[in-house]
Image (cartoon, rainbow, N blue to C red):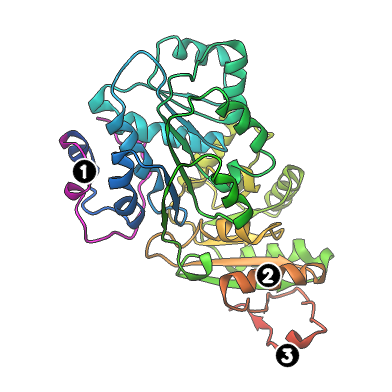
Amino acid sequence: MQQASLPQHPVPETNRSFDDLGMTPELRLAVAELGWIHPTPIQAAVLPGAIAGRDILGLAETGSGKTAAFAIPMAQRLGHGRAVRGLILSPTREITLQTKAFLDYFGASHQLRTVSLIGGLNIRHQMDALAKRPDIVVATPGRLLDHLERGTVKLDRVEMLVLDEADHMLDMGFLPQINAILEKLPKKRHTMMFSATMPPPIERLTQRFLTDPLRVDIMPPGRAAAGISHRIYLVDIDNKKPCILSLLNQELGSTLVFVRRRSDAEWLYRALHRAGHPVDRIHADLTQKERIASLDGFREGQHRILIATDIAARGIDVPGIQHIINYDLPETVEDYVHRAGRTARGNATGLVSSIASWIELERIRDIEAAIQEPLPRCTTPGVEPYVERTKSASRPQRRLR
């Protein structure tokens, strides 16, 4: 079996054995060939119930091994047949391709065939792949709906459904597409949802899709990964660009920069490129080929800075990211936690720096409440800080060293 395409990360493990989780000998061998000795906490908690056929709601940090936690049960429970019986919905093209790599690997021993359906690629090639009667489809909702409307895929025999990144899949942007797809599925099925965050309003929606689910919540207190140092740089809006240029000259490690809009990603990419920084960007307006090239270049160190929007970043699976910069603060606390989870994987440490103005002070306090610690107010050389005119003004401004 080929395993080179599977992402490898240092992830905290339990002291349990894969031999005790109900896996077939073939899948235990596949795990051993990857060099995995002990399951991660989410894998240890989910695998026995998922293999037994229970619905699952799994909450765990990004990079904790969630994909294998649903790929292994799907590979074990689905035998090779002549209809699509497994469906995985993902919010981005990158996550879809990574998930397919796991299913290709773990499904090999059971002769399972997996097809990925994503936008940005030739739909005719996907139609040809569907004509070969795959067992599992991994898809983004929009492209799957395209195939359903064309009649090139049928979902009436799906036995297992996975919603990956469920918090994002069920927000108001994705919910209409999800509903349209679920209407095509059998009512009786095994459903699993996995997510790094699950705010209460979204969690209530899961009750429509899950039956007596096994809830596995191994998120740490405050819902933010351990090993992360947080900083906030309060500046006037006109000083945001000088601030990030100064930060990038001070912190020289692998850096992921978040912006709110695709147009902002292009603007900041050009600005940093002109300043001489090794930088690329990823967002939904790029072609699939361009997005893959940007990710590969970042992963291989061809450029140490990658600018991303939140949606595009859902597919970023890159170990060793040392620094997260929020050039734009996220709209929600959950997105702040999700962004932060891209660094400090496993036992590593990481830094999250946020650039903000006085307009965003209330959002900063919401973030502080969520992570259960104050965000240190810091300064960087050459950029005048904004001083809060509130009780928090007594907090010292920390100069970056």
Q: Quadrant of residue 280?
A: top right
Single out the mark in the foreground, 3 or 1.
Answer: 1
Q: Above or below — where is 360 with respect to 97?
A: below
Single out the mark in the foreground, 1 or 2.
Answer: 1
Give the image location of residue 218, x and y in percent: 41, 61
Mark drawn on residue 394: 3
Amino acid at dot 1: Gly
| Secondary structure category for the residue under label 3 | helix
Q: Label 1 belongs to which residue?
A: 22
Range of the magenta residues? 1-25
| Secondary structure category for the residue under label 2 | helix
Q: Is residue 18 magenta?
A: yes
Q: CA distance from mark 2 to mark 3?
A: 19 Å
Disc with the residue nearer the chain's start (2 vs 3): 2
Mark drawn on residue 366: 2
Q: Are marks 2 and 3 in contact (CB under 8 Å)?
A: no
Give the image location of residue 329, x and y in percent: 70, 60
Residue at the (57%, 17%) spot, across then down: 147
